Image: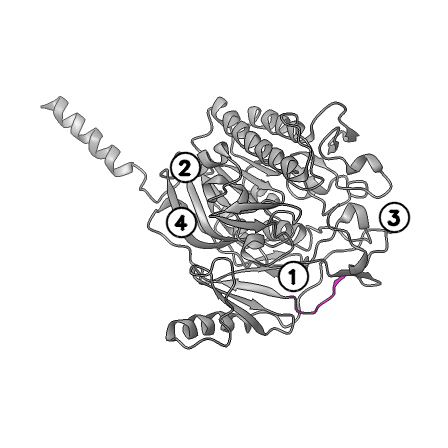
């Protein structure tokens, strides 16, 4: 009887202290993979028909595949929204600005903007970044990544004006580490970056780590990979996508080999739609690459989260999420209470994002959002005596709920309204056709959001760097986003 009583007591203790289905272990590892320029029409688990992406699909099959996640339609606005938890109208980087190439004193100033790497470092994470940054010139700010909270880094510098070798991110790449910038002869850039990540993970398995991997793939120039040779652009693009898939699998294999996969949150997504140079078939529809466009193919991103210890496999979620939500969600997952604002010196900066941690932990939970937003299509920035300024005081944008999408023009007025469930390719503009209560209700809900926006978008906020010999006078007409 004594033994039976002891067993029952132990079982009771275990049942009382076991974590609930909606609780998470303290400080899981986080790996954020951000692919460059790739829409859903190139991921087979999202209905792509012209390619197979088995490693990415495996992440989705054993985790959550999200349907309604908005990024921004071009590089800089997306990356700044991830870092800051703010919309472009607030952080000011509404347009693409290639700092190493154009300069003009512009840069990402972590003293004036929230920065998620810095916050996770403060929360006790060992931190690493490998890939593409492009919002600081490392010749001017060699400590930019350290100041943003990253312990270790291996980065393509971006195309630095005056240094031809720096244009290379693929074959014999020009990369920057704590030892400085150099060409890696005989190497393929994406391999060097994943080697760096592997080394970091191997050395940090005993503490929580954050790896931010903003890939250089699949951005132009379209090239052949070490695995494939193609003659045309479409063939090269497919080779790059397959290499992206291969490296995704390699990251998972590294985590498995080090015994840390179970409690590592892998977030896999892309920064914006595919280059317009290629088209891919999805659900029997030929989809032209929509980078720079606020069409769904340019803004509604593939988004997968894998966390074996906590996420039941095979989930599909229609939760509304946008890229401002990274900041509060990663803080929440790290055990830091999400905030709606952060003090930077004497300035209080608002956080637009909302944590979606509960969506990960509870299959029945929805996000707390009623709408998501994307903005920043096209290059309309200019360099003036005041620095980098946006051409429009109020940039066009799109708002969406789970079924309806509203386009808002630069005058702040609605000009297109679509039912994206029944009209996924956005062919039937419902403005002027609203004659049903449901349409009117959703139209009114989304148009009401417009009134909550500031009347004037911010310009980028930074203390200008000193003038450099290589600074280039750039206007909207002369920018070349394809390079």
In this figure, which residue is indicated by the disc labeled 3?
A: 468
Mark found first going from the N terminus, 4 or 1: 4
SS type, badge 4: strand
In this figure, which residue is indicated by the disc labeled 2?
A: 61
> In whole angstroms, how far apart are the C-alphas of marks 4 and 1?
37 Å
Picture residue at 56% right of the left edge, 42% below the top: 120
In this figure, which residue is indicated by the disc labeled 1?
A: 347
Q: Give, as a single range, the part of the protein colored magenta.
A: 389-395
Give the overall secondary structure of the magenta segment: loop
> In whole angstroms, how far apart are the C-alphas of marks 1 and 3?
29 Å
> In whole angstroms, how far apart are the C-alphas of marks 3 and 2?
49 Å
In the image, residue 46 sits, relative to residue 13, either above or below, namely below
SS type, badge 2: helix
Question: How many other residues sit within 10 Å of disc 3, few (<14), some (14-19) or many (≥20)?
Answer: few
Quadrant of the drawing holding the N terminus: top left
Question: How many other residues sit within 10 Å of disc 2, few (<14), some (14-19) or many (≥20)?
Answer: some
Mark found first going from the N terminus, 1 or 2: 2
Q: Is residue 259 visible?
A: yes
Mark found first going from the N terminus, 3 or 2: 2
Quadrant of the drawing holding the C terminus: top right
């Amino acid at each position: 009887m004594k033994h039976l009583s002891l067993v029952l007591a132990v079982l009771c203790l275990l049942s009382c202290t076991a974590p609930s289905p909606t609780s998470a272990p303290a400080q899981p590892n986080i790996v954020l993979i951000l692919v460059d320029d790739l829409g859903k029409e190139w991921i087979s688990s999202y209905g792509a028909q012209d390619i197979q992406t088995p490693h990415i699909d495996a992440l989705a099959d054993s985790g959550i595949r999200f349907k309604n996640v908005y990024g921004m339609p071009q590089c800089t606005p997306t990356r700044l929204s991830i870092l800051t938890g703010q919309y472009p109208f607030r952080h000011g980087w509404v347009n693409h600005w290639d700092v190493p190439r154009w300069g003009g004193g512009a840069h990402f100033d972590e003293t004036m903007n929230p920065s998620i790497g810095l916050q996770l470092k403060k929360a006790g994470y060992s931190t690493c970044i490998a890939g593409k940054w492009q919002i600081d010139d490392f010749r001017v700010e060699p400590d930019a990544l350290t100041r943003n909270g990253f312990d270790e880094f291996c980065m393509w510098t971006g195309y630095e004006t005056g240094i031809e070798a720096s244009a290379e991110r693929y074959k014999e790449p020009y990369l920057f580490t704590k030892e400085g910038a150099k060409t890696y002869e005989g190497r393929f850039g994406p391999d060097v970056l994943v080697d760096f990540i592997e080394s970091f993970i191997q050395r940090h398995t005993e503490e929580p780590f954050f790896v931010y991997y903003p890939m250089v793939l699949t951005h132009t120039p379209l090239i052949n990979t070490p695995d494939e040779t193609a003659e045309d652009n479409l063939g090269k693009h497919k080779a790059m996508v397959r290499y992206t898939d291969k490296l995704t699998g390699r990251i998972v294999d590294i985590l498995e080999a080090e015994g840390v996969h179970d409690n590592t949150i892998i977030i896999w997504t892309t920064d914006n739609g595919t280059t317009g140079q290629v088209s891919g078939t999805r659900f029997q529809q030929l989809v032209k690459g929509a980078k720079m466009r606020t069409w769904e193919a340019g803004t509604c991103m593939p988004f997968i989260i894998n966390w074996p210890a906590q996420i039941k496999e095979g989930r599909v979620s229609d939760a509304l999420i946008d890229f401002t939500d990274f900041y509060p969600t990663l803080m929440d997952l790290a055990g830091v209470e999400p905030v709606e604002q952060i003090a930077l010196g004497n300035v209080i900066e608002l956080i637009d994002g909302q944590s979606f941690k509960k969506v990960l932990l509870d299959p029945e939970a929805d996000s707390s959002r009623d709408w998501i937003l994307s903005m920043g299509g096209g290059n309309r920035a200019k360099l003036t005596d005041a620095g980098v300024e946006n051409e429009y005081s109020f940039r066009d944008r799109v708002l969406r709920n789970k079924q309806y999408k509203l386009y808002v023009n630069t005058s702040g007025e609605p000009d297109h309204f679509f039912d994206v469930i029944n009209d996924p390719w956005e062919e039937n503009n419902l403005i002027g056709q609203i004659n049903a209560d449901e349409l009117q209700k959703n139209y009114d809900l989304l148009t009401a959001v417009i009134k909550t926006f500031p009347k004037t978008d911010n310009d980028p906020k930074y203390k200008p760097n000193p003038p450099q010999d290589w600074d280039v006078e750039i206007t909207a007409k002369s920018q070349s986003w394809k390079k």
